[in-house]
Amino acid sequence: MEGLLYKELSYQVQGAFFEVYKAMGCSFKEKAYDNALSDEMVIYRKLSVERQKRIGIYFKGRNVGTYIPDQIVEQKIIIEIKAKTFLTKQDIAQFWNYLKGSEYKLGYLVNFGKPGGVEYIRRVYDTVRQKAKAD
């Protein structure tokens, strides 16, 4: 766990995922999980959360579009919320591309719809971006 990007903040965010799933299970729509997760982080964990913030998508330093993530925590971590039985390769690829095209270094794709427990994917896009800018 040494050297983990935003270690303490990541711990709080992941804990919020588990708390929401423990209380709600897997049978609600994305919006309900979005609201509950925001409440858990803002009210109970005292974290700042921006919801539905428009962020630019960049290609070779030029803005080529807009991405609206479900949440941005502490102006550092993008969170994309799903409520599906399983995440598809398309969900994962789309999330990776959103992270890759933004200026954020860390993101979570979290799925509350999977029976048996919350599922999340933590992605870091930092060193790859630095290499791409250097080329």
Image: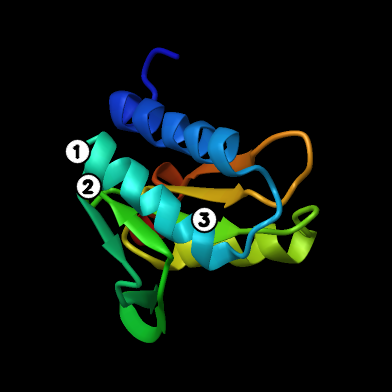
Q: Which residue in the structure is indicated by mark 3?
A: 33
Drawn side of residue 1 relative to residue 49, left or right: right
Out of 55 and 62, give the one closest to the viewer.
55
**Can residue 96 be seen from the camera position used here?**
no
Residue that extends furthest to the bottom in the rendered view of this protein: 64
Q: Amino acid at mark 3?
A: Tyr
Residue at 57% across, 48% down: 110
Label 3 vs label 1: CA separation? 18 Å
Q: Which mark is residue 74?
A: 2
Out of 23 and 67, give the one closest to the viewer.
23
Q: Which residue in the structure is indicated by mark 1?
A: 46
| Circle 2 residues within 10 Å: few <14, some 14–19, many ≥20 | few
Residue at 42% across, 67% down: 69
Eye-nearest disc, 3 or 2: 3
Out of 6 and 113, give the one closest to the viewer.
113
Disc 3 secondary structure class: helix
**Circles 3, 2 touching at the beta carbon (< 8 Å):** no
